[in-house]
Amino acid sequence: MKVRTSTKISLMSKFRKTATLAVLVTLACATPATAADRLPSIFTLPNQTAFVPTDSSTQRNLASASKELARLSTTFEKCYTKGVRNISKGKPHKLEVCLGRAQARFEAKLAAIENKGSGIPGCADFRQMALAIGLGHQNLNGLQYCASPAGAMVDGPILY
């Protein structure tokens, strides 16, 4: 039985496409996933393990999210400083408004980053990190605005 030339070309084209697809699927399944390298211990606390992101999209997203987290920390500090300044002038502190605005901006930026490219790994909980930073600033306020406003030794003199 004779097959027309155009039919031969069509069959060969389908065969090549199918064969190429089969080879690609086989390679994808046979190639082990590239394991990320561990970050050196200087990057983490002793009980933590961290890894270098395997793709550049994730790396960029993590860097962007970290930058937003740093910006949030700076804004938190500005809110607290301004609130204390307002109280010292006898004005309302307006701390909740300032912190709320900072948190809303951070959430919007983080949501945009999460929807870009490969997003952010599930283990990188930037919302939890933001909460920790907020609590850290509150803790530092207790140390910064201590019980000795005029420099008096409330607890007694320092003995060396």
Image (cartoon, helix red, strand yellow):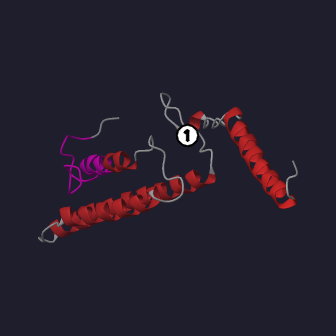
Q: Nearer the viewer, residue 114 or 83?
A: 114
Residue extending furthest toward the front: 1
Residue displayed at 45% across by 40% down: 123
Residue at which label 1 appears: 43
Q: Nearer the viewer, residue 12 or 57?
A: 12
Q: Nearer the viewer, residue 2 or 111?
A: 2
Counting other residues with Cα less than 10 Å from the Cα at mark 1, is it few (<14), some (14-19), or many (20 or more)? few
Please give left or right for residue 55 compared with residue 23 in the image. Answer: left
Q: Is residue 156 above or below residue 81?
A: above
Specify the quadrant that holds the C terminus.
Answer: top left
Q: Please, what secondary structure does the residue beneath circle 1 have? A: helix
User: Which percent across, then down, holds residue 50?
Assistant: 54, 36
Which stretch is magenta? 134-157
So how many labels did they put on this image? 1
Residue displayed at 25% across by 41% down: 157
User: Which percent across, then down, holds residue 108?
Assistant: 36, 63
Residue 100 found in image quarter? bottom left
User: Which percent across, then down, holds residue 96?
Assistant: 19, 62
Q: Is residue 49 above or below residue 13?
A: above
- Say which amino acid is labelled 1: Phe
User: Which percent across, then down, holds residue 17?
Assistant: 75, 51
Residue 75 found in image quarter? bottom left
Residue displayed at 61% across by 36% down: 40
Please give left or right for residue 82 compared with residue 124 in the image. Answer: left
